[in-house]
Image: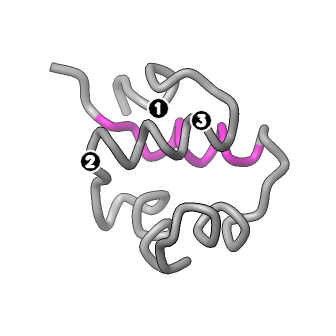
Amino acid sequence: MKTFNRHKLKENIQKSGLKVGYISDQLGMHRTTLSYYMSGRRSPGHEVLKKISKLIKCKIGDLYGQE
């Protein structure tokens, strides 16, 4: 089973050039929730990761892997 990787999420968000506030607004979530995903305090579900990957234009597989 693949494991969510917070470092890859953060890296891909930075590569996209989009701001955390913009991404969270587009996904209808609180900015803090996205920040928690990026810091590893919470783990997003697969469906949330699909939405994030679509928005930041990366493959969903780019958000999984070893820490």
Look at discs 3 and 1 and give the one toward the viewer.
3
Tell me the crowding category of disc 2: few under 14, some 14 to 19, or many 20 or more residues within 10 angstroms, Cα based.
Answer: few
Quarter of the view holding residue 47: top left
Quarter of the view holding residue 25: bottom right
| Colour basis | one colour
Tell me how many marks there are: 3
Q: The C terminus is located in which quarter? A: top left
Precedes in sequence: disc 3 or disc 1? 3
Tell me the crowding category of disc 3: few under 14, some 14 to 19, or many 20 or more residues within 10 angstroms, Cα based.
Answer: few
Tell me the crowding category of disc 1: few under 14, some 14 to 19, or many 20 or more residues within 10 angstroms, Cα based.
Answer: many
Three-letter amino acid code at the position of disc 3: Lys
- Coordinates of residue 34 in the picture (x, y in percent): 49, 66
Is residue 48 highlighted in magenta?
no
Three-letter amino acid code at the position of disc 2: Gly
Give the number of the disc on residue 45.
2
Residue identifier under label 3? 54
Question: Helix, strand, or loop for circle 1?
Answer: helix
Q: Residue at x 51, y 71 (%)?
A: 28
Q: CA distance from mark 3 to mark 2?
A: 14 Å
Q: Which span is picked out in magenta?
A: 4-14
Precedes in sequence: disc 1 or disc 2? 2
Residue identifier under label 1? 63
Q: CA distance from mark 1 to mark 2?
A: 12 Å
Three-letter amino acid code at the position of disc 1: Leu
Precedes in sequence: disc 3 or disc 2? 2
Q: Is residue 26 above or below residue 11?
A: below
Is residue 11 highlighted in magenta?
yes
